[in-house]
Image (cartoon, rainbow, N blue to C red):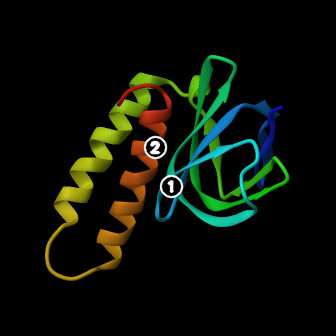
Amino acid sequence: MSLTVRVTAPDKTVWDSPAEEVILPSTTGQLGILTGHAPLLTALDTGVMRVRTGKDWVSIALMGGFAEVDKDEVTILVNAAERGDAIDREAARVAFTEAEAKMNQAKGGGATQEQIRATQNYKRARARFQAAGGMS
């Protein structure tokens, strides 16, 4: 028995296949889903979703959204998503390094718009770089 997993962004369906296991970046931490999981609705943070099909794992960078689990169906609605195997690792590394530097520059007193924007850009760049296999 397997899970039916669908990841949908506003512009495309990123994943629509069966899987044995899913690990989601929920807003409260990593969340593992196996067959028979209790019904669940959770908010997703920007991060990397991992999907296991047989012995292989597929990484997908998610840019926030929601996940619903019900009767071995996992429905994931996100603001944006990208499969790790479709991301240029070197370009993702450069973007991550730049975003990290900008975030560190923006740190200071208080939560300014610049700090918030820099942190969001950093989280997106980190998720893409991780999904591409650039970080462990």
88 over 24 or under it: above or below: above
Horizontal side of 7 relative to 106 (left or right) equals right
Q: Quadrant of residue 58?
A: top right
Task: Estimate how packed mark 1 is, as few (under 14), some (14 to 19) or many (20 or more) residues with alpha carbons within 10 Å.
Answer: many
- Percent from the top left, x then y, of residue 30? 48, 51
**Residue 26's disc number:** none
Name the N-terminal-most of marks 1 and 2.
1
97 or 63, nearer to the observer: 63
**Residue annotated with mark 2:** 127
Farthest top residue in view: 55
107 or 32, nearer to the observer: 32
Farthest left residue in view: 108
Task: Estimate how packed mark 2 is, as few (under 14), some (14 to 19) or many (20 or more) residues with alpha carbons within 10 Å.
Answer: many
Query: Residue at (18%, 67%) from the top-left corner?
Result: 107
Q: Quadrant of residue 68?
A: bottom right
Horizontal side of 53 relative to 11 (left or right) equals left
116 over 68 or under it: above or below: below
- Percent from the top left, x then y, of residue 42? 64, 66
What residue type is disc 1 on? Thr
Q: Quadrant of the C terminus?
A: top left
Horizontal side of 8 relative to 31 (left or right) equals right
- Percent from the top left, x then y, of residue 60? 60, 37
Query: Residue at (46%, 64%) from the top-left corner?
Result: 28
Horizontal side of 74 relative to 58 (left or right) equals right
53 or 124, nearer to the observer: 53
Disc 1, SS:
strand
Disc 2, SS:
helix
Label 1 with label 2: CB-CB less than 8 Å: yes
**Residue 46's disc number:** 1
What residue type is disc 2 on? Ala
* Mark-to-mark CA distance, 1 and 2: 7 Å
